[in-house]
Image: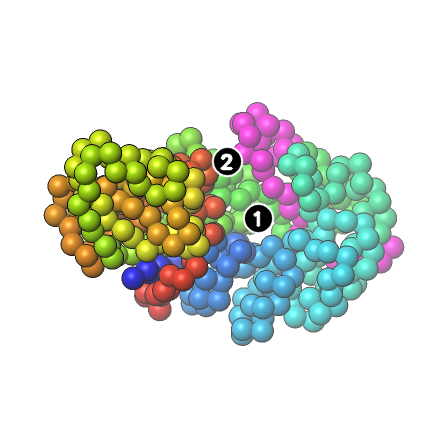
Amino acid sequence: MREIQIDLAAIRGNYLTLKKTFAPAKVMAVIKANAYGHGMHEIAAALEQVSVDQLGVADLTEALELRSAGVRAPIMCWLLGPADDLQLAKESGIALGISTLSNLARVPSDALIHIKIDTGLGRNGFMLDQLPAVIEIVKDRKLTIAGVFSHIANTSEAEDWEQNSKFQEALALLDAAGIEVETRHLAASAAALSYSEMHYDMVRCGLIVYGLNPFDDRQLDQVSLSPAMRVSAEIINIKQVAKGQGVSYGYRFVTQEPTRLGLVPFGYAEGMPRVSVGAKVLINGKLLPVVGSIAMDQFVIDLGSTAAEIGDEVVIFGNAAAGEPTAEQLGESSGSINYEIVTRIGGRANRVYLGQ
């Protein structure tokens, strides 16, 4: 009665479209956080079928899990703690994003290393004034630098270009020190679509691999992609109620006239945002409002006079091209974004993989 469909053919098609769009730059497919809720193992296997350039995950646990599952494609991770086994990472052929002097000092000398620069996001990465110390350790240990990378904050065009300038400054400092860099990568999905000058040798694509829009202020019209996730449930109860009927906890919604209410067994345990207000779902080709507070296991629809029966499909989000609500719209209804919607989705819902 709850289902999440993942279209692997759409994932492969999106990746190949991005490869063509961003060529000659390589394309890293980011599959961290269980592939943004789509299923890390299944997405990795699907992308290996189209010879993915690189897979990206956040931490070493994710990377090692992929290797244990038999994934042979190049993998990179970039959130490393002081207790992470960097020797095991090296033996597993995992590229490591290095952001601290302590990890740079202890990483195996023949490991695949990408130096991260903080160009303005204020998160992980070396500040520019730390680069002399980085250069000293690299030269002293005779380390080979496979890559240098950073991340755009997507704050404003002016600030994005300022970050690009700092990235170029870092590259120039390394070059002046005689340190060769094989792969430079700065742009993730939004920056890759916005600035061709920031493609460098590789771009990192996360959300757009799954066919979703990385922009919160404009449509995704630079490239044609297909959303890979479709989430649905079914109506399990319908009742006729009078005017003045309160619905769900706190009576955030009270009926203004006699109507029919439909119950859907998909709650915040499955990732439906509890604070969602104004969301709509698709039933028999018609968009209908979700009303009242989302509960742990269920939510309510105001069916009105719509012809609907117990057992009818309720599309929570899917593909706008098919007239379905989108993850973006569900995110907007809860003051959130599509990234959070798809990453949190799951719970007791049955997962079905199409196009294997």
Residue beneath the point at 26% across and 44% down: 301
Picture coordinates of residue 224, whole percent (x, y): 33, 45
* Residue 262 visible in the displayed image: yes
Q: Which amino acid type corresponds to the residue marked 1 in the rendered image?
A: Asp
Quarter residue 156 falls in = top right
Q: Which residue is mark 1?
A: 201
Magenta span: 139-165
Residue beneath the point at 81% across and 60% down: 106
144 within the magenta span: yes
Q: Is residue 346 left or right of residue 168?
A: left
| Residue 312 or residue 103, whichever sits in front | 312
Residue beneath the point at 83% across and 42% down: 132
| Residue 136 or residue 126, whichever sits in front | 126
Q: Which residue is mark 2?
A: 195
Mark 1 or mark 2, earlier in chain: 2
Q: Give the position of the C terminus as an image quadrant.
A: bottom left
Picture coordinates of residue 91, whole percent (x, y): 69, 71
The answer to whether 344 is drawn above or below residue 164 in the figure is below
Q: Which amino acid type corresponds to the residue marked 2 in the rendered image?
A: Tyr
Q: Which of the colour schemes (rainbow, by chain, secondary structure, one colour) is used? A: rainbow
Mark 1 nearby-residue class (10 Å; few <14, some 14–19, many ≥20): some
